[in-house]
Amino acid sequence: MVVTSNIKATFPCDSQRVWEVVTSLTDYSWRSDVERIEVISDTQFAEITKSGHRTTFTITRQEPRYLWEFDLESDHIKGHWIGTFSGNEKTTTIDFTEYIEPKKWFPKLLVNIYLKYMQVRYVRDLRQALRRM
């Protein structure tokens, strides 16, 4: 069972700034869910949540300011994430889609609700971070 979740949002700033904040593996202080990020290699990193859950990400495609794509895996899920960035010097729209497959059986509705919650939280955190810049 693969669950798909998508979120789109527009920010009043240029795509370079949004790209830099989203893809930074060193400045993640704006993320309310992440305790730390460990860089494993040029194409792999791990996020450790504040509750101790570790997810490993392997970057599969990257086109600066336009596309960031990776596979992800944790003890509970595996999947693929695609993030696109579009806009101009005044606004940027992000379009993030996750394709997640639980490793254990969970009701699809609960997985979908959890993914949507995490995406909304991420966009809220990102919006606040961009306002402070």
Image (cartoon, grey):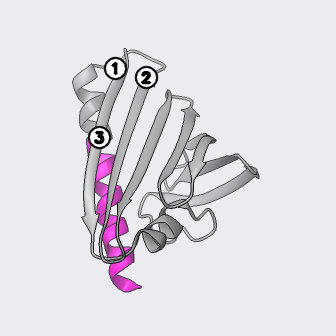
Mark 1 element type:
loop
Disc 3 or 1, which lies upstream in sequence?
3
The rendered magenta stretch, by its main secondary structure, is classed as: helix
Check contact, mark 3 vs mark 2: CB within 8 A.
no
Disc 3 or 2, which lies upstream in sequence?
3
The three-letter amino acid code for the residue at tag 1 is: Phe
Give percent across and percent down for residue 37. 62, 57
Q: Residue at x 34, y 20 (%)?
A: 106
Give percent across and percent down for residue 50. 50, 56
The three-letter amino acid code for the residue at tag 3 is: Asn
Check contact, mark 2 vs mark 1: CB within 8 A.
yes
Q: Decide whether residue 122 is among the magenta residues.
A: yes
118 sits to left or right of 44: left
Q: Residue at x 37, y 85 (%)?
A: 132
63 sits to left or right of 94: right
Q: Quadrant of the C terminus?
A: bottom left
Residue occupied by mark 2? 102
Q: Decide whether residue 130 is among the magenta residues.
A: yes
Give percent across and percent down for residue 67. 49, 50
Residue occupied by mark 1? 106
95 sits to left or right of 133: left
Residue 24 picture quarter: bottom right
Q: Residue at x 34, y 76 (%)?
A: 13
Residue occupied by mark 3? 6
Mark 3 element type:
strand
| Looking at the image, residue 44 lies above or below residue 127 | above
Closer to the eye: label 2 or 1: 2
Q: Which residues are magenta?
A: 116-133
Residue 113 picture quarter: top left
- Quick one: label 1, few (<14), some, or many (20+) residues within 10 Å? few
